[in-house]
């Protein structure tokens, strides 16, 4: 009895999490069955822990925007702009001169701060357009996404920026105690967001606003301000994803990760986030992320082309929509 | 009605002001060559925009139609080459039907599962593009393999002139197809019961179904219409540029949506007009194409499109501000 109530608390009386776990196990079993010798290798799982974090952080960012019934279509633009801005900065200060490791570390720190600042600034712009000018999130972030990507094109002139300092690449490629640095970052970010959403006024307010915006206003919640903060958070998270992405690939380009937008939305929705607002958990998003990473790595081992993997992502999204609809019709 | 007139009037004024400014910066803007080129660039985006307009009036949004356009174009032309068919009419019917069929999928998912159109169409777009590129192929069909009659058809000019430098240019007759479709859409939206039901659905879905509109049928019609127009526009695009590239139209959905919003349609539904959309499309195409003759670096194009979307949506949001809590 004690045991089941504990499990219930972890699952948050949420059948969605259970369904996700079942899907994950099924995907895992299917992929192990289809390619037994290649899929079940340590190397495969290790490479997943490198690729997963950037997408996971984008999905969590998307979930935060969806909590209030919004959406952020500019996350990929923000991520690329953050990476590119840092890259441009490194090129202007480091090129040609051989500097001591101390200086390089300092510059890397400044680069990280710049990237985070541009993410926050982008979030402020989104938040301003959505909460103050009352532009629909879809159109506002569609427009700002174009602006961010456009600025990235202007900064680079088109080609990728390469040659980041080693300390920057460590963020995306390194290992701490045998665990991938980006994965550690992901766990920290996910944990922080989970605490923020469930244990603070901001998080609870966001849920309430998403559940019923009108009632939230009548209850005296500062709706505009809360929505503003949520987009700032989204922008900041997108910038973190951008840092990891450019660190992992040692390059930043204006059109990197174009398919990440669909994937981030898919993971957020699959993770039980209600795009109409009011519902979303970091735990759900994280499990959905793992399920989809297993799926795509499995198909990659099976030598499916990237286009077909895009097809599978889209098909999975539609399938999840249908599944959720069936589950909700029970009640 | 007066409000509708007014917002279109404002768009027209802004458009003329912009034309005068661009003309002052570079008088080459007013050359017939440039104007004909602008009108030609309107055709494809414009036809797609008519479909998106109808979807937006119904309160939805569609980001999958560019994938449908690419699929309709590529499949039709591949099939024509495979069976060695030469002709114009039937291929366009086929492309339109492919688009219509794919649009029905959107409607099915949106209606049956009550899911947000943006997310459904993101999914269907990705599915269609993934299948097209993954299974059908990624190779571009070049002019030497393209069906010659299609090219000849799209080459038809309304007016043919010779410029001072001796090169020939003309106003494409495709503009007539675009304007004809626009007129048909306008008459349909304004003067038929089915057209009014789209406005009713977009204005208040619950009220629309209570007064007896078949909202399911309206929803299916709207997404099929957008898909059909996209399919038609896709094949026309291939015929006009003399090649079929299955990767074409990627990202064009943003331009089309921007043009429709610029034309005064509301994303909340229930608002929008064909005349506004025509003006919005012309404005967007003009600004994008004129960056070059205004000597602005082309890398700024996306920033400008983004700014246009923000400004246009901010204006419509300001216009609709009383409706929001």
Image (cartoon, coloured by chain):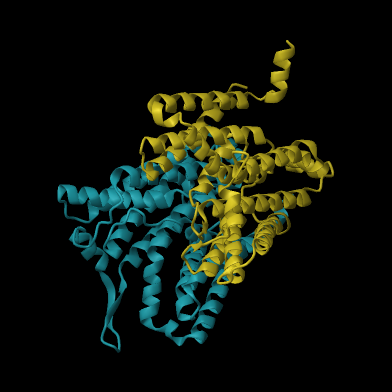
Residue B111 visible from this viewpoint: no
Q: Is residue A166 above or below residue B292?
A: above
* The hue in which chain B appears in the rendered picture of the protein: cyan
Residue B80: horizontal and vertical position, in percent?
20, 50
The quadrant in which residue B43 appears is bottom left
Classify the position of the C terminus of chain A by image quarter: top right
Residue A186: horizontal and vertical position, in percent?
63, 42
Residue A221: horizontal and vertical position, in percent?
82, 45
Residue at the spot 59% in from the left edge and 51% down from the top edge: A170
* The hue in which chain A appears in the rendered picture of the protein: yellow
Is B158 on the left-hand or right-hand side of B188?
left
Task: Please identify the residue farthest to the bottom as the structure is shown.
Answer: B164
Residue A98: horizontal and vertical position, in percent?
59, 68
Q: Nearer the viewer, residue A17 or B188?
A: A17
Classify the position of the N terminus of chain A by image quarter: top right
Task: Please identify the residue farthest to the left as the structure is shown.
Answer: B84
Residue at the spot 34% in from the left edge and 47% down from the top edge: B133
């Amino acid at each position: 009895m004690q045991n089941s109530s504990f499990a219930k608390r972890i699952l948050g009386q949420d059948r969605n999490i259970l369904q996700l776990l079942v899907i994950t196990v099924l995907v895992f079993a299917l992929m192990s069955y289809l390619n037994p010798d290649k899929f079940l290798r340590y190397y495969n799982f290790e490479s997943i822990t490198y690729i997963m974090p950037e997408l996971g952080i984008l999905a969590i960012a998307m979930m935060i925007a969806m909590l209030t019934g919004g959406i952020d279509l500019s996350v990929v633009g923000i991520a690329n702009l953050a990476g590119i801005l840092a890259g441009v900065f490194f090129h202007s200060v480091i090129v040609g001169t051989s500097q001591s490791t101390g200086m390089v570390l300092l510059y890397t720190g400044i680069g990280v701060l710049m990237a985070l600042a541009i993410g926050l600034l982008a979030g402020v712009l989104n938040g301003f357009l959505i909460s103050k000018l009352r532009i629909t999130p879809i159109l506002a972030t569609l427009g700002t996404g174009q602006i961010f990507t456009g600025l990235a094109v202007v900064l680079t002139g088109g080609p990728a920026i390469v040659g980041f300092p080693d300390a920057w690449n460590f963020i995306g490629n390194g290992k701490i105690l045998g665990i991938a640095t980006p994965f550690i970052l992901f766990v920290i970010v996910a944990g922080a967001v989970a605490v923020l959403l469930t244990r603070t006024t901001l998080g609870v307010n966001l849920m309430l606003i998403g559940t019923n915006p009108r009632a939230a206003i009548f209850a005296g919640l500062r709706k505009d301000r809360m929505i503003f903060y949520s987009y700032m958070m989204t922008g900041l998270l997108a910038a973190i994803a951008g840092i990891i992405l450019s660190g992992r690939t040692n390059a930043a380009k204006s059109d990197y990760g174009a398919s990440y937008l669909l994937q981030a939305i898919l993971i957020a929705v699959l993770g039980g986030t209600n795009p109409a607002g009011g519902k979303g958990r970091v735990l759900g998003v994280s499990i959905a992320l793992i399920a989809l990473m297993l799926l795509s790595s499995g198909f990659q081992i099976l030598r499916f082309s990237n286009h077909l993997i895009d097809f599978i992502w889209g098909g999975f999204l539609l399938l999840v929509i249908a599944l959720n609809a069936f589950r909700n019709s029970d009640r | 009605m007066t409000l509708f007139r007014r917002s279109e009037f404002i768009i027209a004024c802004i458009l003329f002001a912009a034309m005068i400014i661009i003309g002052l910066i570079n008088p080459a803007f007013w050359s017939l060559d440039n104007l004909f080129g602008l009108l030609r660039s309107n055709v494809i985006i414009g036809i797609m925009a008519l479909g998106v307009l109808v979807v937006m009036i119904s309160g939805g949004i569609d980001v999958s139609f560019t994938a449908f356009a690419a699929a309709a174009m590529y499949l039709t032309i591949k099939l024509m080459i495979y069976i060695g068919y030469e002709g114009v009419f039937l291929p366009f019917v086929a492309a339109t039907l492919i688009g219509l069929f794919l649009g029905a999928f959107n409607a099915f998912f949106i209606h049956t599962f009550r899911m947000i159109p943006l997310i459904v169409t993101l999914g269907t777009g990705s599915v269609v593009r993934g299948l097209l590129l993954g299974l059908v192929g990624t190779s571009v069909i070049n002019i030497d393999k393209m069906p010659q009659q299609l090219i000849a058809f799209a080459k038809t000019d309304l007016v043919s002139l010779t410029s001072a430098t001796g090169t020939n240019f003309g106003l494409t007759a495709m503009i007539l197809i675009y304007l004809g479709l626009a007129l048909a859409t306008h008459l349909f939206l304004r003067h038929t019961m089915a057209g009014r039901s789209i406005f009713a659905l977009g204005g208040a879905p619950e009220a629309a179904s209570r007064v007896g509109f078949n909202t399911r049928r309206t929803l299916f019609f709207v997404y099929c219409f957008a898909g059909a127009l996209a399919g038609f526009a896709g094949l026309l695009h291939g015929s006009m540029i003399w090649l079929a590239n299955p990767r074409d139209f990627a990202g064009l959905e943003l331009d089309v949506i921007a043009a429709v919003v610029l034309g005064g349609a509301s994303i909340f539904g229930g608002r929008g007009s064909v005349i506004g959309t025509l003006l919005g499309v012309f404005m967007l195409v003009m600004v994008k194409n004129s960056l070059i003759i205004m000597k602005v670096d082309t890398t700024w194009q996306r920033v400008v499109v983004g700014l246009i979307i923000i400004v246009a949506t901010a204006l419509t949001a300001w216009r609709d501000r009383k409706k929001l809590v």
